[in-house]
Image: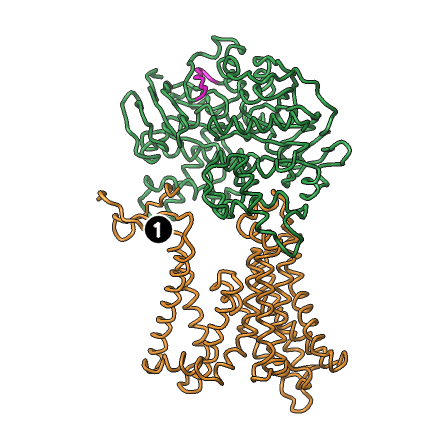
Amino acid sequence: MSDFALKRPLMNRRYTLEVRQQMAWPWQALILGVSMLLGLLLSGAILVLAGVPAGELLNEFVILTLFDAQSLKSVLFQASPLIMVGLAGCLAFRARFWNLGLEGQMIFGAVGATAVTIWDIGSPGMRLPLMMVVAMVCGLLWAVTPVLLKLKLQVNEIVSTLMLNYIAINVLLHLMYGPWKDPKDAFPYSPKYDSFELLPELGNGLSLSIPIAIVIALIVLWFVNISRAGLYLRFVDKSPKVAGAVGVPVAKTILIAVLFSGALAGLAGLMVAAGQEGRLTHSFYVGYGFSGILIAFLARNNPIAATCAALLIATLFVSGRSLQVFYQIPFAMVQLIQAVLVICVASSDFFIRHRIRRVQGVD
Amino acid sequence: MSKQNAIQLSGVSKTFDGFKALSDADFTAKWGEVHALLGENGAGKSSLMNIVAGLYGPEGGSLFIDDNPVKLKGPKEAAKMGIGMVHQHFKLVMPFTVAENILLNLGHIQTAGLYRERLRRVSDDIRAMAKRIGFEIDPDTRVDQLSIAEQQRVEILKVLLAGAKVLILDEPTAVLTEEEAERLLTTVQGFAREGAAVILVTHKMNDVLRYADQVTIMRAGRTVKSLKPDSVSVDELIRLTVGESAPDQSATPGEREPGAPYLQVKGLTSTGPLRALNNLNLTLNQGEIYGLAGVGGNGQSELANALMGIPEPVEGQMEIVGEGDLADFDAARRRAIGIASIPADRYGAALAGPLSIADNYALGDIHSGRYGPFWYLKTRAIEADAAEAVRQFDVQGVRSLKQKAALLSGGNAQKLVIAREFKHPPRLVLAHSPSRGLDVKATEAVRDRLRAARDDGAAVLLISEDLDEVMAMADRIGVMSAGRIVAEFSQPADRQAIGQAMVNHV
């Protein structure tokens, strides 16, 4: 099988590269873990160069964030919308649909939920469930156009979803500076939600958004592993050309996965608005979409791994804020670290797909 | 015009994965002649020429160029010795211009000067050469904006500018209209008159009769004979090409009473510009194997796609008696009716290579609900059924049902496809080259399954470019040419007459 070796000289001629057919999953996990660790070490080095004392790194990132009850709470708090966008990314990417519009779908979810609060639709008791449904529907609607354009007219979804983000951001800005501006202080954000419009805290101080995120992760896991759609998605993902020929309803599968993805992104928008901010603001959405893509990528589109990756990124977010406060390190450093992690994991793919072999007896 | 040998091969063999593509083949082409290499698909013509072009190393025998023994290390070296091959599938970089493509090929010759200068020089050379041989090609056009015939001219210019004196054309007329083919072959005939050697790999009798000075006939990896085309009758040429008789007549086709018509294809025509299918009519009865013979590229793939539900731009009727038009059925409906499809391209249309054997098998019964409702996939039931099918259909090399389907050998992959398609007794079997690339044992297993389906009353359509297979299997034989069925035969059929129908209508 490995006969079609790419005989490329590597360093010197005594090594050849071969394409691997299959690698046992423990090895894949090991390679992924090592590359992730390498990424973290590189990030540490960058932080040291930026002025964080080397001795404090472990303290800042691990001890103070994960072993401090208050910080841990904020990590989990931060994690839930990230889990949602990560799962949204997994779903779309499994259908080979490059949904770069997670951010726009998220914004529209939040806009829809806020509309419910502003127009006071539904009784106070039903308000929050209604907001959730509306957020999901709005996120889904923001994904409908690109997926239909792709299925009917072969319009490249990378462009259409990305461009829709800009439309969503500008609509949001219009609302914040225009009709929905808070009349109390004239700052560009919506009026505060009423108390029954906020995601409630559970007894131990954790937000309801965390159990919701976990339940949704389980639903996605069911969808991709246990339902029939999961089988169809595997065909669409791995052999799109064969899928149609052997009777997989390709268009329907892509449509459902992408709409599901949009709905989850919309729900993530609600979690930011009703869980974290307590109102619609325009500054907190930028960057989530990118993180969602990255989480799905780090997790290889696996919902459980995406949940873990989202926790990792949430830790980065939280410690990034404290670095900002204590060492005056710009928050952009968090995005730099994300990027370093992605590059490391992406390059590890090379070692999973290839085998480097020493050739004996050849000059 | 010297008459010494341009190319001489003697006693050449070549094996691929245990399959002997060439055994002890001899071939001689002289300067100044158009030499046709004639044979059916899979006879070894392309393999033999790939050895001359330095793409394959021969396993035995020797190669002489201009009467000097040579050992080629690769295509570059062959090009240096003046050999240029135009492959059936063009090797052009689509978004590049003509001049860029040709310069890319001349990289090792045109080294002096800046890139812009070299490109300008090559463009001048292209214009001069194109004018000399009567091709209208603008060197600055992008290749993807050219027609197929024009792209072929670019390929020819490419090898000529690289200094080729031996021009090998692999099935050059397969993609051309009659007019274009005529023009091309007249041009290359002109090269030969100027002293070059032109080798024409073809299976079209007309090309041979009209343009070749000498013809070498190949069959099953051997060179059967080399002769002057005008020295023998057409019948004799056909006999040499298709062989004496089928080796296997153990089945007794022809004695069966055909059942009622089951599939009726009427006026099936491609809507694309190439008209691959041209008003094709076909009636397939229950309880018969209808063998569709023909030279490859006469619309077989397009017909198979249209029937198997793979997107193909066609209009016309494909009616299943009592059920409706095949074009209107979705996968679930096709399965429910009992339509089994065995496409020619196993990993392009039948099996998802990166997915497991169980996943691939599951598709066969997924719509019926046997493997659970939409919200729950009964993995255990799938694996149990797949394990049973693997055993029953003798799929070998299965270590685990979770193993990738791509790891199966050709024969076992085909058995897996049949296991899935034949899970429920089929009423209509559509098989396209079902034994291509399989060894003798696997071939026999596949054929037994088709015969068994026929004996159980199914209507079986066997599309195959292998005349031996059609002769051995079919109760009725249709010959496909230029997108329609030009002749039908009932068994026992005259092999000679079929061969004639295959080539005379091209």
Q: Nearer the viewer, residue B177 or B317?
A: B317
Chain letter, disc 1 residue: A
User: How would you classify the magenta stretch by its main secondary structure?
Assistant: strand
What residue is rendered at 26% in x and 46% in y?
A359
Q: Nearer the viewer, residue A103 or A88?
A: A88
Where residue B482 sits, quadrant-wise, is top right
Chain B's shade in the image? green
- Segment tinted magenta in the rendering: B212-220
Q: Which residue is mark 1?
A: A355
The kind of residue tagged 1 is Arg
Residue B68 in magenta stretch: no
Q: Position of residue A271 (x, y in %)?
A: 61, 76
For the question of whether residue B64 can be seen, the reply is no
Chain A's shade in the image? orange
Relative to B348, does residue B462 appear above or below in the rendering? above
Quadrant for the C terminus of chain A, please: top left
Dot 1: what SS? Answer: strand
